[in-house]
Amino acid sequence: MADNELTTRKNDHLDIVLDASRRRASASAGFEALRFEHCALPELDLDAIDLGTTLFGRPLAAPLLISSMTGGAARAEAINRHLAEAAQALGIALAVGSQRVALEAGDANQGLTRELRRLAPDVPLLGNIGAAQLVLGYGVDEARRAVEMIEADALIIHLNPLQEAVQPGGDRDWRGVLGAIEALAPRLEVPLVVKEVGCGLSPAVARRLLDAGVAALDIAGLGGTSWAAVEAARATNQRQRLVAEAFVDWGTPTAEALRQVRQACPEALLIGSGGIRDGVDAAKAIRLGANLVAQAAAVLESALQSSEAVVEHFRAVIEQLRVVCFCTGSADLAALAQARLIDTGG
């Protein structure tokens, strides 16, 4: 695919994600049916609650990851700068969007250079390439370039088979992807993270990935951005639109995916994403098994504005998470992971 065509497609994606009127809403992530049991006697100092954790050897002030987002080169550069500055100010992790354009397009780097590490010297940075590229010529050299480009602490491999299937010109041959991941994991100097992009990871796939040497999994379940809905909005003819629209609700809701994968893979490092609306949803995700919680589309508008807007967004999320801990009697994240959560079935 030509570089300008790929950049145009990324720009289209950004426009559609920002304009909900151009796409059908996704299904629920499943968090609204869950409620924490309220503790009227927390016996805690709210300000002393410890939300700290670590990721790949770096400390985090809160268990949050700014998840992968991107766009055309001009906007992506500003987005990445704002996100890096905010991540450093807040002490949370940052995953960049796909580095494919930056790897293939010379000077169109989308702000994905070592300047990103200069802006965020103390927090985990995660690079990102697509799984389909691993069977289309990408190997350890390209993976290393993606890591070195931003001095990343880990590399995300994103799985988006549904999006590729309904996208005009998408990558349709996925034979050999698992083998490519298994071959890459021991040769790369940083950990591999595998992320779905909105349909969820099943327990069986999660186990195969962990057995292949993957260090962490991002569930990215149904309930956040529906890439089938985005591709339906991009469709240039009725057949393309009808095919994509049939899959808007495809996948496992985030809450259920977290529950299933944690039960099947108790040792896994899990990132919960997909429809995390606020700190209350983040707390529910942690209770269901997430070690870390990620947001992307929810912060995209702030990311286009300024680093200060991103900081304010996540400060609210962090304060909401802290209040959940307080009102469940949880002094830290380990206690929150054991708090009583009630399924109302609603």
Image: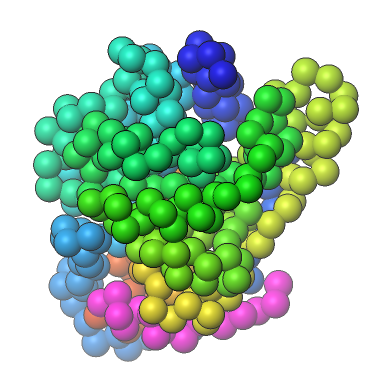
Q: Quadrant of the N terminus?
A: top right
Q: Along the line of sight, which residue is nearer the eye, 138 or 343? A: 138
Q: Quadrant of the C terminus?
A: bottom right
Which image quarter: residue 83?
top left
Q: Which coloring applies here?
A: rainbow
Q: Is residue 174 left or right of residue 63?
A: right
> Is residue 341 one of those drawn in magenta?
yes
Q: Along the line of sight, which residue is nearer the eye, 102 or 302? A: 102
User: Measuring 63% from the left and 62% from the top, which residue is drawn there?
Assistant: 253
Q: Along the line of sight, which residue is nearer the eye, 113 or 276? A: 113
The relative height of residue 46 versus residue 106 in the rendered view (above or below) is below
The relative height of residue 200 versus residue 162 in the rendered view (above or below) is below
Residue 252: % across, % down: 66, 62
Residue 135: % across, % down: 53, 40
Q: Is residue 120 left or right of residue 298?
A: left
> Is residue 43 one of those drawn in magenta?
no
User: Measuring 36% from the left and 25% from the top, which residue is drawn there?
Assistant: 103
Q: Is residue 205 left or right of residue 147?
A: right
Which image quarter: residue 30?
bottom right
The relative height of residue 151 versus residue 113 in the rendered view (above or below) is below
User: Measuring 74% from the left and 45% from the top, which residue is drawn there?
Assistant: 248
| Magenta span of residues | 332-346
Can the viewer see residue 215?
A: yes
User: Measuring 81% from the left and 29% from the top, which residue is drawn there?
Assistant: 241
Residue 235: % across, % down: 75, 23
Q: Is residue 246 left or right of residue 149?
A: right
Residue 56: % across, % down: 23, 60
